[in-house]
Image: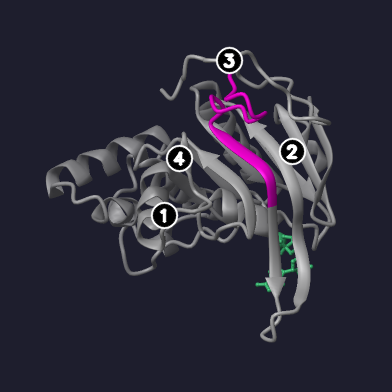
Protein backbone atom coordinates (compact mmCIF):
# COMPACT_ATOMS: atom_id res chain seq x y z
CA UNK A 1 0.00 0.00 0.00
CA UNK A 2 1.33 3.37 -1.03
CA UNK A 3 4.92 2.23 -1.10
CA UNK A 4 6.51 4.31 -3.79
CA UNK A 5 9.86 3.25 -5.14
CA UNK A 6 12.18 6.15 -4.43
CA UNK A 7 13.37 7.83 -7.61
CA UNK A 8 16.00 9.89 -5.81
CA UNK A 9 18.03 9.51 -2.66
CA UNK A 10 16.46 10.88 0.50
CA UNK A 11 16.89 14.58 0.98
CA UNK A 12 16.34 15.64 4.52
CA UNK A 13 14.34 18.78 5.18
CA UNK A 14 16.81 21.12 6.88
CA UNK A 15 16.52 21.13 10.63
CA UNK A 16 14.18 18.20 10.73
CA UNK A 17 14.67 14.81 12.30
CA UNK A 18 13.54 12.09 9.92
CA UNK A 19 14.13 9.09 12.12
CA UNK A 20 11.61 6.44 11.32
CA UNK A 21 10.67 7.97 7.99
CA UNK A 22 10.43 5.76 4.95
CA UNK A 23 13.04 6.40 2.26
CA UNK A 24 12.06 8.44 -0.73
CA UNK A 25 12.05 11.98 -1.96
CA UNK A 26 11.30 14.08 -4.96
CA UNK A 27 14.52 16.07 -4.99
CA UNK A 28 12.92 19.10 -3.32
CA UNK A 29 13.26 17.86 0.25
CA UNK A 30 9.76 16.40 0.44
CA UNK A 31 9.66 12.71 1.30
CA UNK A 32 6.92 11.70 -1.08
CA UNK A 33 6.88 8.09 -0.04
CA UNK A 34 5.70 9.00 3.47
CA UNK A 35 1.97 8.65 4.05
CA UNK A 36 1.60 12.25 5.23
CA UNK A 37 3.92 15.10 4.36
CA UNK A 38 3.65 18.66 5.64
CA UNK A 39 5.97 21.18 4.09
CA UNK A 40 6.20 24.74 5.39
CA UNK A 41 2.56 24.40 6.36
CA UNK A 42 0.93 27.58 7.63
CA UNK A 43 -2.53 28.44 8.85
CA UNK A 44 -3.48 32.02 9.52
CA UNK A 45 -6.84 33.13 10.82
CA UNK A 46 -7.88 36.57 9.56
CA UNK A 47 -10.23 39.17 10.95
CA UNK A 48 -13.20 40.22 8.79
CA UNK A 49 -11.27 43.34 7.78
CA UNK A 50 -8.50 41.17 6.34
CA UNK A 51 -5.92 41.84 9.03
CA UNK A 52 -4.17 38.92 10.70
CA UNK A 53 -5.89 37.63 13.82
CA UNK A 54 -3.63 34.71 14.68
CA UNK A 55 -0.94 32.65 13.01
CA UNK A 56 -2.09 29.26 14.34
CA UNK A 57 0.49 27.19 12.42
CA UNK A 58 3.76 28.82 11.48
CA UNK A 59 5.68 26.67 9.03
CA UNK A 60 5.46 22.99 9.96
CA UNK A 61 7.73 20.43 8.31
CA UNK A 62 6.66 16.96 9.34
CA UNK A 63 6.68 13.68 7.49
CA UNK A 64 4.79 10.65 8.81
CA UNK A 65 5.57 7.24 7.34
CA UNK A 66 2.91 4.64 6.76
CA UNK A 67 2.28 2.60 9.91
CA UNK A 68 3.63 5.12 12.40
CA UNK A 69 1.90 5.80 15.75
CA UNK A 70 2.27 9.50 16.48
CA UNK A 71 1.22 11.55 19.49
CA UNK A 72 0.48 15.23 18.90
CA UNK A 73 0.98 17.27 22.04
CA UNK A 74 1.13 20.89 23.11
CA UNK A 75 -0.45 23.35 25.50
CA UNK A 76 -3.91 24.73 24.89
CA UNK A 77 -3.78 27.19 21.99
CA UNK A 78 -0.60 25.70 20.52
CA UNK A 79 -2.34 24.66 17.29
CA UNK A 80 -3.22 20.98 17.81
CA UNK A 81 -6.84 21.23 16.67
CA UNK A 82 -5.89 23.40 13.73
CA UNK A 83 -3.31 20.81 12.72
CA UNK A 84 -5.70 17.89 13.19
CA UNK A 85 -8.34 19.67 11.11
CA UNK A 86 -5.85 20.05 8.28
CA UNK A 87 -4.43 16.53 8.63
CA UNK A 88 -8.01 15.25 8.65
CA UNK A 89 -8.93 17.25 5.52
CA UNK A 90 -11.61 19.21 7.38
CA UNK A 91 -9.73 22.39 6.62
CA UNK A 92 -6.98 23.59 4.32
CA UNK A 93 -3.71 25.36 5.08
CA UNK A 94 -3.25 29.02 4.19
CA UNK A 95 0.02 28.10 2.48
CA UNK A 96 2.47 25.25 2.22
CA UNK A 97 1.98 21.64 1.21
CA UNK A 98 0.00 18.78 2.65
CA UNK A 99 0.27 15.48 0.84
CA UNK A 100 -1.73 12.51 2.12
CA UNK A 101 -1.33 9.15 0.43
CA UNK A 102 0.30 10.91 -2.50
CA UNK A 103 -2.49 13.45 -3.05
CA UNK A 104 -2.18 17.19 -2.64
CA UNK A 105 -4.82 18.13 -0.05
CA UNK A 106 -3.81 21.79 0.22
CA UNK A 107 -5.29 22.70 -3.14
CA UNK A 108 -8.01 20.08 -3.65
CA UNK A 109 -11.48 21.55 -4.34
CA UNK A 110 -14.04 21.20 -1.49
CA UNK A 111 -16.16 18.44 -2.99
CA UNK A 112 -13.14 16.33 -3.86
CA UNK A 113 -11.55 16.97 -0.48
CA UNK A 114 -14.60 15.74 1.42
CA UNK A 115 -14.79 12.60 -0.74
CA UNK A 116 -11.10 12.03 -0.19
CA UNK A 117 -11.60 12.46 3.56
CA UNK A 118 -14.39 9.88 3.56
CA UNK A 119 -12.21 7.31 1.81
CA UNK A 120 -8.87 7.90 3.53
CA UNK A 121 -9.47 9.06 7.09
CA UNK A 122 -11.10 7.56 10.15
CA UNK A 123 -11.89 9.91 13.04
CA UNK A 124 -12.32 9.18 16.71
CA UNK A 125 -13.33 11.97 19.08
CA UNK A 126 -13.23 12.41 22.82
CA UNK A 127 -17.02 12.61 22.97
CA UNK A 128 -17.78 9.50 20.83
CA UNK A 129 -20.31 11.44 18.69
CA UNK A 130 -22.59 8.48 18.03
CA UNK A 131 -26.14 8.97 16.74
CA UNK A 132 -28.44 8.06 19.66
CA UNK A 133 -31.43 7.03 17.51
CA UNK A 134 -29.43 4.47 15.53
CA UNK A 135 -28.34 1.02 16.65
CA UNK A 136 -24.69 0.18 17.11
CA UNK A 137 -24.62 -1.55 13.76
CA UNK A 138 -26.38 1.33 11.98
CA UNK A 139 -23.96 3.85 13.51
CA UNK A 140 -21.03 1.92 12.07
CA UNK A 141 -22.72 1.73 8.66
CA UNK A 142 -23.13 5.51 8.43
CA UNK A 143 -19.81 6.33 6.70
CA UNK A 144 -20.52 3.64 4.11
CA UNK A 145 -23.66 5.44 2.90
CA UNK A 146 -21.40 7.96 1.23
CA UNK A 147 -19.63 5.20 -0.67
CA UNK A 148 -22.66 3.78 -2.45
CA UNK A 149 -22.02 0.25 -1.23
CA UNK A 150 -24.89 -2.24 -1.55
CA UNK A 151 -26.86 -2.74 1.65
CA UNK A 152 -25.65 -6.29 2.15
CA UNK A 153 -22.02 -5.28 1.94
CA UNK A 154 -22.54 -2.34 4.28
CA UNK A 155 -24.03 -4.66 6.83
CA UNK A 156 -21.33 -7.30 6.43
CA UNK A 157 -18.56 -4.76 6.85
CA UNK A 158 -20.18 -3.15 9.90
CA UNK A 159 -20.67 -6.52 11.59
CA UNK A 160 -17.13 -7.61 10.77
CA UNK A 161 -15.63 -4.37 12.11
CA UNK A 162 -17.71 -4.52 15.29
CA UNK A 163 -16.38 -8.03 15.81
CA UNK A 164 -12.88 -6.66 15.52
CA UNK A 165 -13.44 -4.22 18.38
CA UNK A 166 -15.13 -6.86 20.55
CA UNK A 167 -18.74 -5.75 20.10
CA UNK A 168 -20.09 -8.47 17.84
CA UNK A 169 -22.74 -9.19 20.48
CA UNK A 170 -24.10 -5.63 20.74
CA UNK A 171 -25.24 -4.99 17.16
CA UNK A 172 -28.85 -4.07 17.93
CA UNK A 173 -28.22 -2.00 21.05
CA UNK A 174 -28.56 1.77 21.19
CA UNK A 175 -25.53 3.81 22.29
CA UNK A 176 -27.31 4.76 25.55
CA UNK A 177 -27.39 1.08 26.49
CA UNK A 178 -23.60 0.84 26.35
CA UNK A 179 -20.82 1.86 28.72
CA UNK A 180 -18.49 4.72 27.75
CA UNK A 181 -15.76 2.29 26.76
CA UNK A 182 -18.17 0.32 24.59
CA UNK A 183 -19.40 3.52 22.95
CA UNK A 184 -15.82 4.47 22.13
CA UNK A 185 -15.34 1.01 20.61
CA UNK A 186 -18.36 1.64 18.38
CA UNK A 187 -16.81 4.97 17.38
CA UNK A 188 -13.55 3.20 16.55
CA UNK A 189 -15.42 0.63 14.46
CA UNK A 190 -17.18 3.47 12.64
CA UNK A 191 -13.79 5.05 11.96
CA UNK A 192 -12.36 1.79 10.62
CA UNK A 193 -15.27 0.52 8.57
CA UNK A 194 -14.25 2.47 5.47
CA UNK A 195 -10.76 0.91 5.69
CA UNK A 196 -9.01 4.26 5.98
CA UNK A 197 -5.26 4.78 5.54
CA UNK A 198 -5.03 6.66 8.82
CA UNK A 199 -6.86 6.74 12.12
CA UNK A 200 -7.01 10.20 13.71
CA UNK A 201 -7.98 10.44 17.33
CA UNK A 202 -8.47 13.57 19.42
CA UNK A 203 -8.07 12.66 23.12
CA UNK A 204 -9.86 9.32 22.60
CA UNK A 205 -9.59 8.35 26.27
CA UNK A 206 -10.32 11.85 27.62
CA UNK A 207 -13.88 10.99 28.70
CA UNK A 208 -13.11 7.54 30.10
CA UNK A 209 -12.04 6.28 33.50
CA UNK A 210 -8.49 5.00 33.61
CA UNK A 211 -9.14 1.27 33.29
CA UNK A 212 -11.60 1.76 30.41
CA UNK A 213 -9.16 4.21 28.83
CA UNK A 214 -6.47 1.57 29.14
CA UNK A 215 -8.54 -0.95 27.20
CA UNK A 216 -9.17 1.61 24.44
CA UNK A 217 -5.44 2.36 24.29
CA UNK A 218 -4.73 -1.34 24.00
CA UNK A 219 -7.19 -1.57 21.11
CA UNK A 220 -5.46 1.36 19.38
CA UNK A 221 -2.09 -0.28 19.98
CA UNK A 222 -3.39 -3.51 18.48
CA UNK A 223 -4.51 -1.61 15.37
CA UNK A 224 -1.06 -0.08 15.18
CA UNK A 225 0.60 -3.52 15.39
CA UNK A 226 -1.64 -4.63 12.53
CA UNK A 227 -0.24 -1.80 10.42
CA UNK A 228 -2.60 1.14 10.89
CA UNK A 229 -1.13 4.64 10.85
CA UNK A 230 -2.35 6.52 13.93
CA UNK A 231 -2.21 10.23 14.75
CA UNK A 232 -3.49 10.99 18.22
CA UNK A 233 -3.82 14.22 20.14
CA UNK A 234 -3.14 13.68 23.82
CA UNK A 235 -2.33 15.78 26.87
CA UNK A 236 -1.13 12.77 28.79
CA UNK A 237 2.63 12.14 28.92
CA UNK A 238 2.06 8.53 29.98
CA UNK A 239 0.03 7.94 26.84
CA UNK A 240 2.50 9.82 24.63
CA UNK A 241 5.42 7.71 25.79
CA UNK A 242 3.55 4.63 24.55
CA UNK A 243 3.45 6.08 21.02
CA UNK A 244 6.36 5.66 18.61
CA UNK A 245 6.81 9.36 18.10
CA UNK A 246 5.88 12.59 19.82
CA UNK A 247 5.36 15.84 17.90
CA UNK A 248 4.89 18.70 20.34
CA UNK A 249 3.65 22.10 19.20
CA UNK A 250 4.30 25.44 20.81
CA UNK A 251 2.78 28.65 19.45
CA UNK A 252 2.15 27.03 16.08
CA UNK A 253 5.63 25.60 15.63
CA UNK A 254 7.13 22.17 16.21
CA UNK A 255 8.84 22.48 19.57
CA UNK A 256 9.85 18.83 19.83
CA UNK A 257 9.82 15.91 17.39
CA UNK A 258 11.19 12.77 18.96
CA UNK A 259 11.05 9.02 18.57
CA UNK A 260 10.34 7.13 21.78
P1 LIG B 1 -5.18 23.79 20.51
O1 LIG B 1 -6.07 22.77 19.87
O2 LIG B 1 -3.77 23.34 20.64
O3 LIG B 1 -5.73 24.29 21.79
P2 LIG B 1 -6.05 25.53 18.35
O4 LIG B 1 -5.59 24.92 17.07
O5 LIG B 1 -7.48 25.34 18.71
O6 LIG B 1 -5.09 25.06 19.52
O7 LIG B 1 -5.76 27.10 18.29
C1 LIG B 1 -4.51 27.64 17.90
C2 LIG B 1 -4.64 29.17 17.85
O8 LIG B 1 -5.51 29.54 16.79
C3 LIG B 1 -5.24 29.76 19.11
O9 LIG B 1 -4.61 31.01 19.34
C4 LIG B 1 -6.70 29.94 18.75
O10 LIG B 1 -7.25 31.00 19.50
C5 LIG B 1 -6.63 30.25 17.29
N1 LIG B 1 -7.82 29.78 16.54
C6 LIG B 1 -8.25 28.51 16.43
N2 LIG B 1 -9.33 28.41 15.63
C7 LIG B 1 -9.61 29.68 15.23
C8 LIG B 1 -10.60 30.26 14.40
N3 LIG B 1 -11.54 29.53 13.78
N4 LIG B 1 -10.56 31.61 14.21
C9 LIG B 1 -9.61 32.35 14.79
N5 LIG B 1 -8.63 31.88 15.59
C10 LIG B 1 -8.64 30.57 15.81
MG1 LIG C 1 -7.81 21.87 20.62
Q: Nearer the viewer, residue 214 or 65?
A: 65
In front: mark 1 or mark 3? 3
Lower sequence index among marks 4 and 2: 4
Measure the C-alpha gap from mark 4 to mark 2: 30 Å
Vertical placement of 26 versus 251: above or below? above
Q: Is residue 52 left or right of residue 251?
A: left
Which image quadrant for residue 200? top right
Which residue is disc 3 drawn over?
Answer: 8
Q: Considering only vertical position in the picture, is 82 above or below 4?
A: below
Residue 220 pos. (x, y %): 56, 35
Q: Secondary structure at mark 3?
A: loop
Answer with the quadrant where ligand 1 appears in the image: bottom right
Going from the N terminus, do you reach mark 1 or mark 4 first?
Answer: 4
Reading the image, the residue beneath label 2 is 239
Q: Closer to the camera: disc 4 or disc 3?
A: 3
Element marked by disc 1: helix
Span highlighted in magenta in the image = 24-41
Q: Is residue 178 magenta?
A: no
What residue is disc 4 on? 103
Q: Residues within 10 Å of mark 1 (few under 14, many from 20)?
A: many
Q: For the residues carrying marks 3 and 2, which lies nearer the camera in this image?
A: 3
- Label 2 neighbourhood size at 10 Å, few (<14), some (14-19), many (20+)? some
Q: Residue 44, image x and y in percent?
A: 71, 65
Q: Is residue 144 left or right of residue 24?
A: left
Q: Are marks 1 and 4 in contact (CB under 8 Å)?
A: no
Amino acid sequence: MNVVTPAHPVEVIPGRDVRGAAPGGGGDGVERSALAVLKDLRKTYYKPDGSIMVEALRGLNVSIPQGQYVAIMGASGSGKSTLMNILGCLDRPTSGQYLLDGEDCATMPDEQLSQFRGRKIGFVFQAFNLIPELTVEENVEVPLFYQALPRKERRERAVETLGLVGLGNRLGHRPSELSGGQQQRVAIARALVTRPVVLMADEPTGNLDSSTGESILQLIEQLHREGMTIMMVTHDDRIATRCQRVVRLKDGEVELDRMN
